[in-house]
Image (cartoon, grey):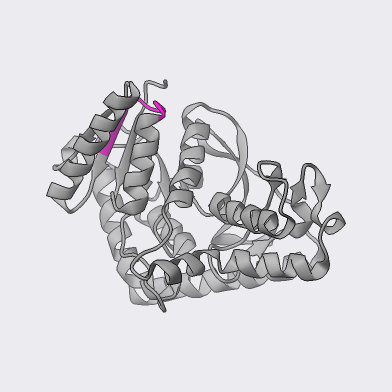
Amino acid sequence: MNKKTVGIVGVGNVGSTLAFTLATKNICSTLLLKDVRENFVQAMALDISQATNASKSKTVTKACLKDEEFKNCDVIVITAGIARRPGMSRDDLLLTNAKIMTSVITQIITNNPNAIIIVVSNPLDAMVYTALKASNWSRNKIIGMAGILDSARMAHFIFEKLGYGQGQIEASVMGGHGDDMVPLADFSTVAGVRLSEVLSKEDIDDIVYKTKNGGAQIVKLLETGSAYYAPAYSTTLMIEAILEDKKEIYPCAVMLDGEYGYEDIVSGVPVMLGANGVEKIIELNLKNEQKEQFSKSIASVKELIDILKEKL
């Protein structure tokens, strides 16, 4: 186990599932939980602490009721914000969650100067941008969790279509975490075999459509919430890569500074994750059609950022 501290701001469904996973898997030595609901966060800390004793994990979980108690974190995950409801687009969340994000960042950066921050709050790309501007930190230290989740959803729909290959599917998605994300069928494989060799164009188009609407489908079925198991586990992979300096390549939301021809915009692209957060941005050789789709995704995020600049 790493002698590291992970902090989680917001212990709703995603935050509490993430905390449970980190604590019972013995991934860090200390886990700090912070939430505006004081009784609730204390209850989560107690419940998870008891689970770690059942699993013989050495992770110590604490509820932080004061800002000064939430300190010296190596990684901080922010899930705080209102959740998306049926009929609500990610855009609807924008202004409220941007204000929450700015408040959270202001509260945590002083006591956690060396932390790598992972943003999970939606609209994801705009929230990463908000966190970067509020903190004035370098882009390698504030990253958005989206690409791993979207790729996992794509992998599920590939398996659903094929009926085989579970555990051997590598799916790839880039772009913003929203309706204009770019599932990359050309970069997705089943046991190393390209999708086009095992599926028809119609099947691949259906997978792409389902991937783009994977989160909305769960929201519609739940009626009173959104997905949390897959987002939490996807975040766990990012945390492990950072704490263990794995140099893993994952699709994550990051501020672009000339990569793919864009700058001052956040979007999901393949990055190398290690002890310093984003240690390298990988530029894929995209086809013209994929470049056009990525450009459309970038434009959607820019619309949100322009709204933030105008109204906040």
**Residue at image location 37% in from the left, 21% down from the top:** 3
Judge left or right: residue 289 versus residue 216.
right
Quarter the C terminus occupies:
bottom left
State yes or no: residue 36 in magenta. Answer: no
Res 226 quadrant in image: bottom left
**Residue at image location 46% in from the left, 69% down from the top:** 305
Furthest residue in direction front, as rendered = 163
State yes or no: residue 29 in magenta. Answer: yes
Is 95 above or below relative to 245? below
Task: Tell which of 33 and 48 is nearer to you.
Answer: 48
Q: Main secondary structure of the magenta part?
A: loop
Quarter the N terminus occupies:
top left
Visible in this render: residue 138?
no
The region drawn magenta spans: 25-32
| x and y, in percent, of residue 52 in the image | 30, 28
| x and y, in percent, of residue 276 in the image | 50, 34
| x and y, in percent, of residue 20 in the image | 34, 38
Visible in this render: residue 213?
yes
